[in-house]
Image (spheres, rainbow, N blue to C red):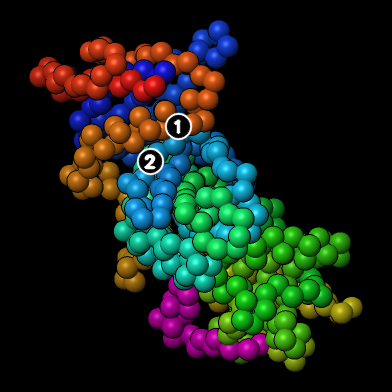
Amino acid sequence: MLTINCIRHNLAVGKQIRFGCLVRLRGNEEVIGGRFFSTETKRTPSSPSPKKNLGFGIVPVNGHIRYTWTRGEGWDEGQVFTSPHMNLHINAGVLHYGLAVFEGLKAFEAKDGQHYICNPKANAARMKDGASRLVMPEVPEDIFVSAVTEAVNINREFVPDYASGGSLYIRPLLFASGPMLPLKATDQFSFVVSVTPVGNYFHGNSSGVSAAVVELDRAAPRGTGSVKAGGNYASDMYGLELARAQGCDTSLYLDAQENKYIEEFSVANFVGIKDGRYVTPDTRSVLPSITNDMLMALARDEGIPVERRPIDFCAEIADFTEVAGSGTAVVLSPCARIKHDGEEYSFGPLRTLASLKERLERIQRGEEEDTFGWMHRVPTTEQEVDIEPERVLRRMLCAVSSDELLQQTEVAAVVLGGGGGVGVGTTSAAASENDNTTTTTTTTT
């Protein structure tokens, strides 16, 4: 049995929703929860202190967003879950057949203290392409943008501050969560959005990474290389091991058909400067980087010629003055040297590319006007988001009553922040004119 008492404050600037529950596990009582779902942008004293030397890894946060699609009903309204774990059927399609596509985008704290997500509609469109290729239900743009926005909103205190130079990495994931035995579409899919604060992907390699051309094929010309399928990255694990065995940081792939033209780095598009031109590969088996697209737009805006074309590695690589990897995670990571077939090619520091990167970062952090319409501001007030308080409360109750907490758990009610329950075994609400709050008691068996 689950009994929850919860206080709901009217959502407005400076107001917070706080909830908690007293959990009895095997006779021992522990208080868990006490999360804040806040509309404030100001950090609270208990918030983690953003560090300037952020790495690129998983950090515990307040929670994640989860939507479920079922055949015949489509997508549900979505829920907030505080636990980073979820239960899956042992025969879930994602576990056996790798049916998953994901995205990567970032949220930033701007100079004005507001939070912005970079180009979420472009990621929504790319995930739709991936879902179509893997025969999964598409996530509508409005659900995608709403989910990533809410994921940032409930984890605001984890957005690295403006001075740190860090960002909140957002990972939307679409996968087959229903059971599959024959290779045909299952009846259930999940769309989850998690976040973690990050710094530089190649932490400690500010002078430039090293890469080795590996004798492997990352993706076939008519395969899934052009979508962000999870399996594409699994196949790169061995390539990374081969590159590291040569003393390099990352791998570089040539095309599968002729083993001649540059495809991409392990987790990033190849970009370079040759004869004053911005050059990047044109291939059907490489994921189109949204960051690369934005950098090309900036280059064109500044009058720099842009060439998206096949790049013959052996014939051209020595003529590049600047080389870098481009992607959401790495942004624009300089490449200092590339090894191939006993030869080593070195490249100078980034100048033209560094200037483009700095301009993109100025736009992301609100230091330069966003004339391209890339930045999506995370709303901070009830009036801006037209929030339904009951829906927020229902989502929080779903989070507390998730399967991860219910298993083998007896839950008794406790209210954090004042107020009292109005009964057990029913769902009811009592409004108070004095404190402008609503106390809700819900019992689940």
User: In this view of the protein, which residue sits in the foreground, 438 or 394?
Assistant: 394
- Identify the residue at image location x=65%, y=54%: 96
Quadrant of the rendering where the C terminus is positioned: top left
Outermost residue, left side: 433
Q: Is residue 30 above or below residue 114?
A: above
- Identify the residue at image location x=41%, y=13%: 412
Q: Secondary structure at mark 1?
A: loop
Callout 1, which amino acid? Ser
Along the horizontal axis of the image, is 223 left or right of 443? Answer: right
Magenta segment boundaries in residue numbering: 292-311
Give how far across and how far down residue 254 sits, in percent.
Answer: 73, 80
Tell me the residue that label 2 is attached to: 79
Outermost residue, right side: 342
Give how far across and how far down residue 44 sits, in percent.
Answer: 39, 29
Outermost residue, front side: 182
- Identify the residue at image location x=38%, y=41%: 79
Give how far across and how far down residue 338 sits, in percent.
Answer: 77, 74
Q: Quadrant of residue 352?
A: bottom right
Q: Which mark is residue 402?
A: 1
Quadrant of the rendering where the N terminus is positioned: top left
Count every numbered label the image shows and give the total: 2
Q: Is residue 24 above or below residue 99?
A: above
Callout 2, which amino acid? Gln
* Dot 1 and dot 2 residues touching (CB under 8 Å): yes
User: In this view of the protein, which residue sits in the foreground, 257 or 72?
Assistant: 72
Give how far across and how far down residue 327 sits, in percent.
Answer: 56, 66
Q: Secondary structure at mark 2?
A: strand
